[in-house]
Amino acid sequence: MIALYLLILVDSISATVIVPLLGPLLIDQATLVFLPEASLPVRNLVSGLLVAVYPLLMLYMAPVLGRLSDQWGRRPVLLLCGVGVLMANLAAGLAIDLHSLPFLFLGRLMGGATAAAQSTAQAALVDMGSNKARLLSYSMLFSSLGFVLGPVVASGLSTLSLAAPLHFCSLLTLVALVLILTGYREAAKPGRQVEWSGISIWEGVRCFRDAARDGAVRAILGCFLLMQVAWGGFFVFVSIYLMETPGLRMSLPQVGSFMSILGVGFCVANALVQPALAKRLGMRSLAVAGLGLNAAAIALCLVLGSAYQEYAAALIAGITVNIAYPSILTMLSDRVAPDRQGWILGMVGSAAAMGWTVASVVSGMLGGLEHALPIMMAAVLMAGAALAMTVAGSSWQRAGAPS
């Protein structure tokens, strides 16, 4: 179990370490590595595309790998994903060293194509115990720790070089791979074989068609998708907003602290707040409350005038989004049989990827016009997700799920 949690942690660090570096790599004139002659709107768009290609590949591959893990086994898929994350980190670090933007895109593509480590590890954890909500919440805790450590690694090691954080992630991924090889064994399932005819590269899109057959899943997944568009736009571009907005002009270490405090909020929510509230409130109530309060926290970031006030808003945003996330995850998991947990969790990954792809491209275009626009969009969409969940949750309850 420790090996699974560690892989989730490493995968999360690897996914988030690049975000605080986008400003120095593409926006800040003092540290520009890529496209020094390009205009600011072009550099903002490229920044968005660098984020978008990762979830775009994840959109197609996460459900494929999730379904494959149901048939082939969790362990080989986890190893495959770990190798992909390792190669992606190596490529991204080398791209920064060589000032090669195409190679950085290649690294992001490789990382996205094998970015099913978290959903597959979550499915493996569900296989191991009966307390699904607690196991999923703890898995989100380790994912959240990655959101704390990723910005810390980025801001700390960037003093050596902007590529150093990626090289460090390569080392961590290698350690996680060794532990999966030596420390994780899954229960044998005699006669299990892969039905390749039932697995398609279009699984990431086709899964939404399959989900549409279940009204409760369709409604909840739609809310989750809207939430991911909102959160993706906020998370990716808030660092640029904080660094470039007059009156704030936060440094990279300050932005790293902001992102880390977001991650601290994730940890507090997943380890303490969400499990405690889940004993008293239903998943639907927690999802609606988390989404609504998160919209308010994002809006706060637009009106506060000091770094310390922004840190407080970051803590609230981190807690509230991770009250909603595991609640929605549990609602979706409850709707399918045990032998389809890999499929449903892969579909969650696909929906998250679609949301982040849309958010990265749209926010990149908006950010080229005004740095605050992506944050404004995020607040409005998150409030819309909260309103939509009040309706979607009703369908879930009518389908027989607990309140």
Image: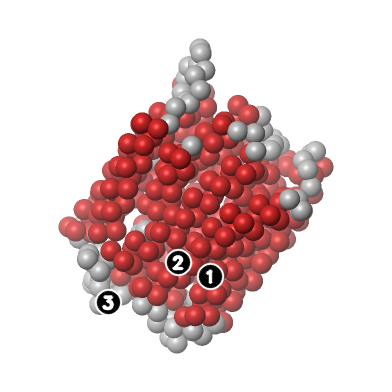
- The amino acid type, in three-letter code, at marker 1 is Ala
Left or right relative to 299: residue 156? left
Whether the residues at callouts 1 and 3 have beta carbons within 8 Å, the answer is: no
- Furthest-top residue in this view: 191
Residue occupied by mark 2: 259
Q: What SS does tag 2 mark? A: helix
Instruction: Indicate the quadrant where residue 95 lies.
Output: bottom left
- The amino acid type, in three-letter code, at marker 3 is Gln
Whether the residues at callouts 2 and 1 have beta carbons within 8 Å, the answer is: yes
Q: Is residue 62 visible?
A: no
Q: CA distance from mark 2 to mark 1?
A: 8 Å
Q: CA distance from mark 1 to mark 3?
A: 26 Å
Residue occupied by mark 3: 29
Tell which circle, 2 or 1, labels the residue nearer the N-terminal end. Answer: 2
Residue mark closest to the camera, 2 vs 3: 2
Q: Residues within 10 Å of mark 2 (few under 14, many from 20)?
A: many
Residue mark closest to the camera, 1 vs 3: 1
User: Residue 34 location in percent, x, y?
Assistant: 25, 65
User: Residue 72 location in percent, x, y?
Assistant: 46, 23
